[in-house]
Amino acid sequence: MEKLLRVRGSISLIRRCLCTPAQDSKTQAQATVESLSSRYKPTEFQKFLLVWTKKYKSKADIPKYVTSDVIDRSRSQARIKLSNILMALTALGSVFAIWSGKNAAKRGESVHQMNLDWHKQYQEEFKKNQEQAQAK
C-alpha cells in the first residue's frame, strides 16, 4: 500500500511539472507587446517574395511593417516553389540528355569511338614530333 502511494505521489508530481499554467492578463499583454515588437520593415527582396507567394497582390499593397511570421511563411513557400521549378528543369534536362544521346548513337557517335580517335590523333602527333626531332 505504501508503494502505491509513492507511485501516485510521483505521478502527480510529474503531471504538475508537465502542465503549463493558464495565462493571466499580464502575460497576454506581454504577448501582445511582443507581437507588435516582432513587426519589422521588409526589404525589397522580402517584398518580392511576399508578392511572388501571393500574400499581397502588389508591392504597393504591402504595409510598412509586417510580422516575422508572414515573412517566414512566404520564404518557406518561395523555397518550395523554387525547388519544384528546379526539379522540373532537372527532369527536362535529363530527358534532353537521353534524346541527344540516342540521336548520337544513331549517327554512330560514342564515347568509346571518340576515345579511340583521340588516341589515334595523339599517336600521329607524337610520331610527327619524333620525326621532326630526328630530322634536326
Image (cartoon, rainbow, N blue to C red):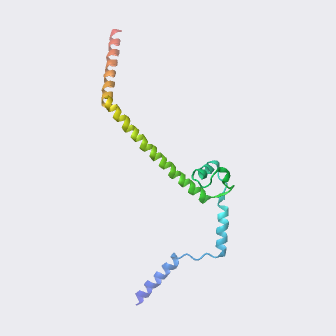
Q: Is residue 77 left or right of residue 102?
A: right
Residue 109 can be seen, yes or no: no
x and y, in percent, of residue 32 in the image? 66, 67
Residue at 51% in and 50% down: 81
Residue at 35% in and 33% down: 103
Please identify the quarter of the rendering in which residue 100 is found.
Answer: top left
Q: Is residue 12 left or right of residue 35?
A: left
x and y, in percent, of residue 60 in the image? 68, 51
In this rendering, is residue 105 above or below 32?
Answer: above
Identify which residue, 119 or 78, lies in the foreground: 78
x and y, in percent, of residue 88 in the image? 45, 46
Query: How many callouts does the rendering have?
Result: 0
State which quarter of the image contains the C terminus.
top left
Identify which residue, 119 or 107, lies in the foreground: 107
Residue at 34% in and 25% down: 118
Residue extending farthest front: 57
State which quarter of the image contains the N terminus.
bottom left
Q: Is residue 103 left or right of residue 12?
A: left
Residue 107 can be seen, yes or no: yes
